[in-house]
Amino acid sequence: QVQLVESGGGLVQAGGSLRLSCTASRRTFSSYVMGWFRQAPGKERDFVAALSWSRGSTYYTDSLKGRFTISRDKAKNTVYLQMNSLKPEDTAVYYCAFLANGYTSRSWSDYDYWGQGTQVTVSS
């Protein structure tokens, strides 16, 4: 069992920045993926970014490249999502996710564990 604890959401004006954090409770797999998804009201849960823990490679949804950056602190078993130049359409609940098999996926249904979600609200 892996528990994911998220932090860092909040209210920000358009053009501002936020950094989300997600810490995994244990590191029991040799290779795994940590990712971020988001879900706006009435919409599906969409892929944002993912990071392969063993390789350090990163993956983004095309529309967010250049504004969002996923990174990690291996010592803290923590993944971050730096979000810059935020827009009102970025408003959503952001979820951290953990995929145990190490193969990066953009599909939320492939992920094994989820954080509780953190609200990000961008005002215009």
Image (cartoon, rainbow, N blue to C red):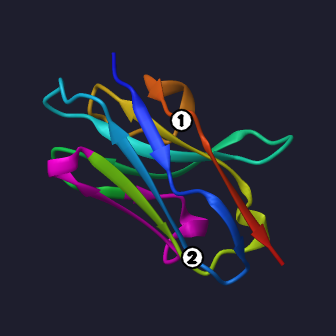
| Image point (43%, 22%), residue name | 112
Q: Which residue position is annotated with label 1? A: 107
- In the image, what residue type sits under mark 1? Ser
Q: Say if 103 sits above or below 83 in the image.
A: above
Q: Which residue position is annotated with label 2? A: 17
Mark-to-mark CA distance, 1 and 2: 26 Å
| Image point (30%, 26%), residue name | 100
**Is 73 one of the magenta-colored residues?**
yes
State the image quarter where residue 111 is shown: top left
Q: Say if 86 sits above or below 20 in the image.
A: below
Instruction: Check disc 1: other Cα within 10 Å, few if <14, some if 14-19, many if 20+.
Output: few
| Image point (23%, 44%), residue name | 77
Tell me the element at label 1.
loop
Viewer-side label of 1, 2: 2
> Is 59 or 22 nearer to us in this picture?
22
| Image point (50%, 42%), residue name | 106
